[in-house]
Image (cartoon, rainbow, N blue to C red):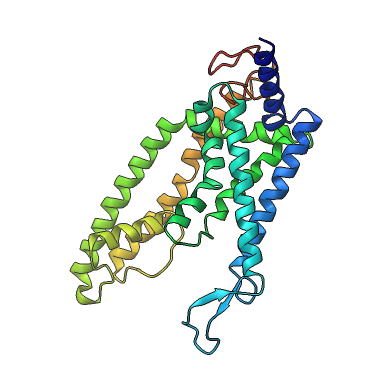
Amino acid sequence: MSNNFEHSAFRKKLHEVIFGANTFGGVLFDVVLLIVIVLSIIVISLETVQGVGWELADPSDPYSDHVPGPYGNLFSILKWVFTGLFTIEYLLRIYCVNRPTKYIFSFWGIVDLLAFLPDYILLLAHYDPHGFAVIRSLRLIRAFRIFNLGWFQLEADDLGHAIWRARAKIIVFLAIVLILVTVTGTIMYEIENELAGNKSQFKSIPDGIYWAIVTMTTVGFGDIVPTTVPGKFLSAFLILVGYSLIIVPTGFVTAEVIESRRRKITVISCPSCVSEGHDADAKFCKYCGEAL
């Protein structure tokens, strides 16, 4: 019984350090973790720099094989040291929560897993994983929990919850936009091919849909443009529609954010499912019912 109690107390303490930001140990853990994340991103970034992390086997041939540069071997060792640290941290997070599956399949659980898992998978595939380091940068958002910046986390949670609650309206909006770009892209294809003939830049309906998307979003790459007068009128119309549609999803999310402002929430992490965003006076987790 004593061993079980001590084991439970150790897990609870470990949870406070790893998931909490209200104690000295929790703040210290998060600070060290953020430093390690930043260093790992710097190392992997420098590893891709020619003359630092790699160099050409034959400097006179720009297409020759890449070989380790002056610091290539050092960077490779440090990269795997960081990967090992992230692996240990992930396993400790699973160990100290009451319901590991809740953490594993949560947003942060997936981000923490992707911080090191691609390294192992791509190593087996004999591929050097550099680009996946950007996933680790997502973990820097944890900085909001440190140095009394918890209210940044609350703001992020408010926005995330507002978008989720407005998801049905957003999906309907996106469906309407998809229909609109499909119809206008098809019409533009017909207009340009009928009036411009072989001079038309719209070689297919997918080309027309692509043009409609970049035009409606006001990006306008300009690689495909109409040359006929009706086509230009349609293009101008779609640009105006695109500007008017920008405010639609914003209104959905804004309404949900205003609704969430009426409730006071905290960044207390549930020891069971590691969920946050509980009401300030909550005694139990609103997601799994565990005592806070």
Image position of 209 with respect to 24: above or below: below
Is residue 276 in sight in this rendering? no
Q: Residue furthest bottom?
A: 60
Q: How many marks?
A: 0
> Residue sitting at 66 percent across and 34 percent down?
153
Residue 73 location, quadrant: bottom right
Residue 280 location, quadrant: top right
Image position of 203 with respect to 252: above or below: below
Is residue 208 in sight in this rendering? yes
Residue 208 location, quadrant: bottom left
- Along the line of sight, the residue nearer the viewer: 77 or 172: 77
- Along the line of sight, the residue nearer the viewer: 47 or 125: 125
Query: Residue 225: x and y, percent?
Result: 35, 68
> Residue sitting at 55 percent across and 75 percent down?
67
Image position of 228 with respect to 145: above or below: below
> Residue sitting at 26 percent across and 51 percent down?
183
Query: Residue 170: x and y, percent?
Result: 42, 36
Q: Residue furthest right?
A: 24
- Along the line of sight, the residue nearer the viewer: 150 or 228: 150
Lateral position of residue 226 relative to residue 66, left or right: left
Lateral position of residue 22 relative to residue 78, left or right: right
Lateral position of residue 257 relative to residue 211, left or right: right
Locate the C terminus by quadrant: top right
Query: Residue 65: x and y, percent?
Result: 48, 78
Image position of 26 with respect to 44: above or below: above
Locate the N terminus by quadrant: top right
Query: Residue 3: x and y, percent?
Result: 67, 15
